[in-house]
Amino acid sequence: MGNYQPNAFGLYDMHGNAFEWTQDCYQDSYNGVPTNGTANKGPNPCRRVVRGGDWGTSADAVRAARRIGFDPNYRFNGSGFRVARRLP
């Protein structure tokens, strides 16, 4: 299994593997973003939010609240995405 205790969903070692692309459009603050769990659509085209950290990020910076905005066409070896599904 994992190196640490699982999170509330029973998932192990979720931080530090790769930055995760999200559907949200980046903006400097959370002012005016949806509060119901839907994506922040923002302008089109927009810079997409990338969260977390990768294998090269210092331990103090690897956290879900860390976010950066990148052009969706930008690629780097520390990025990825997490496959998710809606639970019943």
Image (cartoon, rainbow, N blue to C red):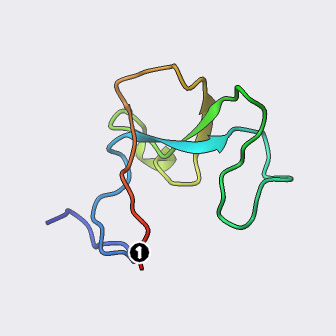
The residue at the point 46 percent across, 48 percent down is 62
Quadrant where the N terminus sits is: bottom left
Judge whether 84 appears above or below 86 on screen: above
Q: Is residue 69 above or below residue 67?
A: above
Residue 12 shown left or right of residue 53 in the figure: left
Query: Which residue of the protein is positioned furthest toward the front in this rendering?
Result: 88
Q: Residues within 10 Å of mark 1 (few under 14, many from 20)?
A: few
Percent x, y of residue 51: 52, 44
- Residue on which the image places disc 1: 87
Residue at 59% from the left image edge and 54% from the top image edge: 65
Q: Residue furthest left?
A: 1
Q: Position of residue 32 (x, y in %)?
A: 86, 53
Q: Secondary structure at mark 1?
A: loop
**Number of marks:** 1
- Residue 19: image location, x then y, percent: 44, 39
Q: Please state which of residues 53 and 44 is positioned toward the viewer in this rendering.
A: 44
Toward the right, the furthest residue is: 32
Residue 79 placement (x, y as % from top left): 40, 33
| Residue at 32% from the left image edge and 44% from the top image edge | 17
- Front position in the image: 18 or 40: 40
Tell whether 42 sits left or right of 86.
Answer: right
Above or below, comparing residue 64 to residue 24 in the picture = below
Q: Residue placed at 52% from the left, 54% from the top?
A: 64
Task: From this view, report whether residue 40 is shown above or below residue 80.
Answer: below
Name the quarter where the C terminus is drawn.
bottom left
Q: Quadrant of residue 42?
A: top right
- Residue in front for this viewpoint, 7 or 81: 81
Amino acid under disc 1: Leu
